[in-house]
Image: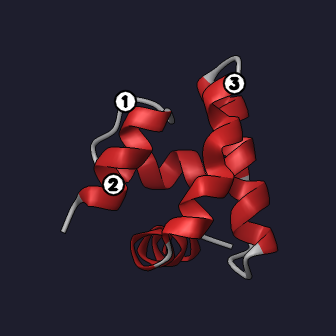
Amino acid sequence: MSTQTVMGFIQQLRANPKLRGQLGGMRKAKNPHAAAEVIAKIATAAGFPCSATDVEAYFRSQGSDDVSDQSLNNLVNKQ
């Protein structure tokens, strides 16, 4: 489990818009950690086992201040 796994999941989101649609629940998350938990749960179910901590670390490594729908969009749309 690592930020590499999260990176693989983000790449999968670029290729699979249906998968991206499953992350709508993170918009209802009460805080960035809860949003990271939603991403980790869906990533793990999609075959990319990771934790919320891994998700947060990856977002920070990419320059995001926190885990949010906007920061996820920025990562998915980044080339």
Image quarter (top left, top right, bottom left or bottom right) of the C terminus: bottom left
Q: Quadrant of residue 1?
A: bottom right
Within-10-Å neighbours for mark 1: few <14, some 14–19, many 20+? few
Q: Quadrant of residue 11?
A: bottom left
What residue sits 71% from the left and 38% below the top?
A: 25
Residue 67 in picture, x, y percent from top left: 51, 36
The answer to whether residue 50 shows anywhere in this view is: no
What residue sits 73% from the left and 76% below the top?
A: 46
What residue sits 46% from the left and 67% below the top?
A: 10
> Which mark, residue 65?
1
Residue topped by disc 3: 28
The answer to whether residue 46 shows anywhere in this view is: yes
User: Reading the chain from its start, which is encountered first: label 2 or label 1?
Assistant: 1
Q: How far apart are the two marked residues, 2 and 3, measured between alpha carbons? A: 19 Å
Asked whether 64 or 14 is in front, the reply is 14
Q: Nearer the viewer, mark 2 or mark 1?
A: 2
Q: Amino acid at mark 3?
A: Lys
Q: Nearer the viewer, mark 3 or mark 1?
A: 3
Helix, strand or loop for disc 3 = helix
Position of residue 60 in the picture relative to residue 21 (left or right): left
Residue 3 in picture, x, y percent from top left: 52, 66
Asked whether 55 or 35 is in front, the reply is 35
What residue sits 42% from the left and 79% below the top?
A: 15
